[in-house]
Image (tube, rainbow, N blue to C red):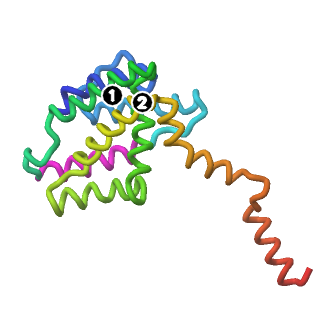
Amino acid sequence: MGRRLIPEIAGALKEEGLLEKETEFTTVDQLLEGLERTSARVAATVNAPPLDVAELRREWDAFRQEARGMKPSRLPSFDALRSVWNGLLDESARQGRSVFETSSIMAVSAVRGIPGGARWLTASTRVVARRTGQLLAVELLDHYRQALEELRQVGYLSYARRQLTPYVRAAAGQFSPARGTLTERLLDRVRFREGR
């Protein structure tokens, strides 16, 4: 079912310059290969770290391996995926934002809302699939539906501010002049021990 959506997802990534415009993508593997080719170039252009495509590929392979043994009734339906994708397209247009911008801020929200963050997410995907037969994808789709509704109600800027504020505060705290550096703290300890 994802193969029907992959060309649309690829189109959104092409609009952001994350995939080559002239290449056709119909599978997740092709998307990952395309991201590998462009991530370093895009990172150099926009002064951002390259995507960790190798990690994305490992997670995709692990997810695919676990999903192979699943009963189709345990996987999200095509209609559920299509509904969330269409909601993302519609809300992006309504907010005057790209699909990439909207989905990125929703991903931040999803990771923030999951206990232990992204590491818990990747580890639990395998555990949940193996132990209960329920895929975390179903929970993520529910989260995205709720996030789209909240985004619709409060608007992109308000939603983004709410999601990013904890990260901005943490980053600002790291660069605060009042915060001593590790080197300063170590020197203070040495001075204290030496009685200075």
Is 65 placed above or below 32 here?
below
Amino acid, disc 1: Leu
Q: How many marks?
A: 2
Q: Position of residue 141 (x, y in %)?
A: 26, 41
Distance of label 2 from label 1 (alpha carbons): 7 Å
Amino acid, disc 2: Thr
Looking at the image, residue 79 sits to the left or right of residue 50; the answer is left
In reply to whether residue 183 is colored magenta, the answer given is no
Is 124 placed above or below 171 here?
below
Which residue is drawn at the image coordinates 47% and 33% (left, top)?
39
Which residue is drawn at the image coordinates 40% and 31% (left, top)?
153
Query: In terms of secondary structure, where does tag 2 sit?
Result: helix
Which residue is drawn at the image coordinates 29% and 37% (left, top)?
145
- Sequence-wise first label, 2 or 1: 1
Is 173 placed above or below 11 here?
below
Q: Quadrant of residue 89?
A: top left
Q: Position of residue 121 (x, y in %)?
A: 35, 54
Q: Position of residue 13 (x, y in %)?
A: 39, 25
The foreground one among 179 and 28 is 179
Q: Residue lying at the far right in this picture: please name it.
A: 196
Q: Are marks 2 and 1 in contact (CB under 8 Å)?
A: yes
Label at residue 80: none
Quarter of the N terminus within the rendering: top left
In reply to whether residue 65 is colored magenta, the answer given is yes
> Disc 2 designates what residue?
102
Label at residue 88: 1
Magenta-colored span: 53-69
Q: Position of residue 159 (x, y in %)?
A: 47, 36
Q: Main secondary structure of the magenta part?
A: helix
